Image: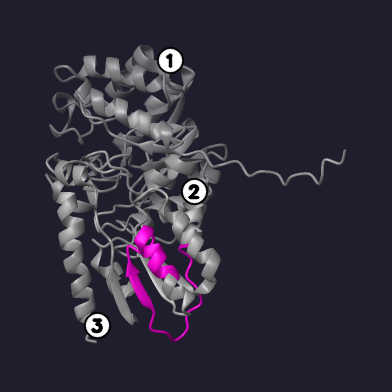
């Protein structure tokens, strides 16, 4: 019996992981996060062991639970950083330790106590970021090189692999200096941090993954050609509710020339929790998760959970713009829902162009959008956007002949459990759309 032509080789789905910092006592959040990450297809987790927290009251007991719990469920990369204030030259966790070998001793202690749960150890986080390493005390990075170099050497001697913390922003000259000091020769991999569209784009420094990682590879080839490049932090903040942009940028990062990707982050930070700059000093810090602070999946989390990276690719293809031509389209906001997709189909059947504005937050609505594309091809113009994003609405209705508003948060339970979210979508979202229409002046 003829079995037919051979199937084309399948491209394996890229492996990826998440970055998530856990605070002492968050046992329930840890358990929920790991379950969620695994459901989303994650292979890796990068989290921190704070040297300062470890020596604070209750710190050792917290990590005695946390690290085994994580290491038994996912490939774990612990980042060891933050000096205990009593050992710091500045009295702060970002200050260099007075005795630099204390850091190597701490790494040795962590390997002895928890080393069976991981094979790689990250040395510090963002060492050129003043909030993480106070380089005012170390203007030529000699202290950092001595501290990190000694720790990397000892980690390698004991049979683990050292990962150098990623500079942020990326600085090829800084990395070359670290290489000339001999530190790069001691590490297995070097981290890279990039946040295009959130931080790296604001001063015009972002030039694309290939360009930046190519510069990094050139430095590593001079000092340690065997060293791998790991993207230890990449992310996008949805503080403007542009969740589709987050999904698109994750896809771009997955295609970057790096051996690993850790996406920052799994969950949004609650507004009342302080970060390094202060409590809600910069809203971008609080919305980098692919689930929100209450655990609600954003678009990226839902798509990964339902179909992995392939589902993200399908959504991006759906949103590919059709060739534009002079028209006054019907704009249907919430147009991928049941009523919206049927209304769209009716107008499309009459020969009208339709802009379908939807954030795809509800499971299955992308199937409706695909149905419309299959039936009406390039007269369907998907605009994957959220009604809470005024700029996206302005663009979507710019040429509209008519606008229908069908986008809403419709679950009564959600309106009770998350009243602010309900208000933001149903009340503020409606005002956003009305304002966008008003600004058209037609």
Q: Horizontal and vertical percent for residue 249?
A: 42, 54
Q: Is residue 109 above or below residue 162?
A: above
Circle number at residue 397: none
Numbered circles on residues, count: 3
Q: How is the image coloured?
A: one colour
Q: Quadrant of the N terminus?
A: top right
One can see residue 70 in this view: yes
Segment colored magenta: 318-345
Give the labeled residue for mark 1.
Answer: 116
Label 1 to label 2: alpha-carbon separation: 35 Å
Residue at numbered disc 2: 311
> Measuring 24% from the left and 67% from the top, which residue is drawn there?
390
Check whether the beta carbons of the residues at disc 1 and disc 3 lie within 8 A of each other: no
Quick one: SS at disc 2? helix
- Give the residue at x 39% y 72%: 355
State how far apart marks 2 and 3 are (Cα). 35 Å
Is disc 3 placed on a helix, strand or loop? helix
Residue at (25%, 63%) from the top-left corner? Answer: 389
* First of labels 1, 2 by sequence position: 1
Mark 1 or 3 closer to N-term?
Answer: 1
Query: Which of the numbered marks, if any, corresponds to residue 440?
Result: 3
Q: Nearer the viewer, residue 257 or 226?
A: 257
Residue displayed at 43% across by 46% down: 303
Displayed quadrant of residue 62:
top left
Using the numbered discs, state the Cα–Cα distance from disc 1 to disc 3 in whole angstroms.
62 Å
Q: Is residue 32 magenta?
A: no
């Amino acid at each position: 019996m003829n079995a037919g032509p051979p199937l084309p080789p399948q491209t394996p789905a890229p492996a990826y992981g998440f970055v998530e910092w856990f605070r002492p006592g968050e046992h329930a959040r840890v358990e929920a996060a790991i379950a969620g990450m695994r459901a989303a297809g994650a292979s890796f987790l990068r989290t921190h062991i704070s040297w300062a927290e470890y020596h604070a009251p209750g710190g050792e007991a917290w990590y005695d639970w946390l690290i085994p719990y994580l290491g038994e469920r996912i490939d774990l990369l612990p980042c060891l950083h933050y000096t205990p204030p009593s050992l710091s030259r500045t009295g702060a966790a970002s200050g260099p330790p007075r005795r630099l070998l204390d850091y190597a001793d701490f790494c040795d202690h962590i390997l002895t106590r928890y080393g069976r749960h991981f094979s790689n150890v990250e040395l510090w986080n963002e060492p050129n970021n003043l909030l993480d390493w106070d380089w005012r005390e170390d203007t030529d990075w000699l202290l950092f090189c001595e501290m990190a170099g000694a720790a990397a050497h000892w980690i390698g001697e004991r049979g683990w692999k050292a990962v150098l913390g990623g500079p942020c922003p990326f600085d090829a000259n800084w990395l070359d200096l670290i290489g000339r000091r001999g530190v790069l020769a001691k590490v297995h991999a070097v981290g890279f941090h990039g946040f295009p569209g959130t931080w790296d784009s604001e001063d015009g420094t972002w030039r694309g993954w290939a360009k930046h990682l190519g510069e990094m590879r050139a430095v590593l080839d001079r000092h340690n050609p065997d060293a791998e490049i790991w993207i230890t932090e990449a992310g996008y903040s949805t503080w403007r509710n542009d969740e589709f942009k987050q999904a698109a940028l994750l896809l771009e990062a997955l295609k970057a020339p790096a051996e690993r990707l850790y996406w920052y982050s799994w969950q949004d930070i609650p507004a009342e929790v302080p970060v390094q700059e202060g409590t809600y000093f910069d809203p971008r810090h609080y919305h980098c998760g692919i689930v929100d602070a209450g655990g609600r999946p954003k678009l990226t989390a839902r798509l990964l959970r339902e179909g992995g990276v392939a589902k993200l690719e399908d959504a991006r293809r759906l949103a590919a713009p059709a060739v534009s031509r002079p028209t006054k389209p019907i704009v249907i906001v919430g147009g991928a829902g049941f009523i919206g997709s049927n209304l769209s189909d009716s107008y499309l059947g009459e020969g009208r162009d339709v802009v379908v504005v939807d954030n795809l937050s509800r499971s299955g609505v992308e199937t409706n959008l695909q149905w419309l594309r299959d039936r009406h091809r390039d007269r369907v113009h998907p605009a994957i956007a959220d009604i809470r994003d005024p700029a996206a609405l302005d663009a979507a209705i710019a040429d509209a002949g008519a606008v229908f508003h069908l986008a809403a948060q419709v679950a009564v339970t959600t309106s009770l459990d998350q009243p602010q979210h309900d208000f933001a979508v149903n009340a503020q979202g409606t005002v956003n759309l009305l304002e966008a229409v008003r600004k058209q002046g037609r």
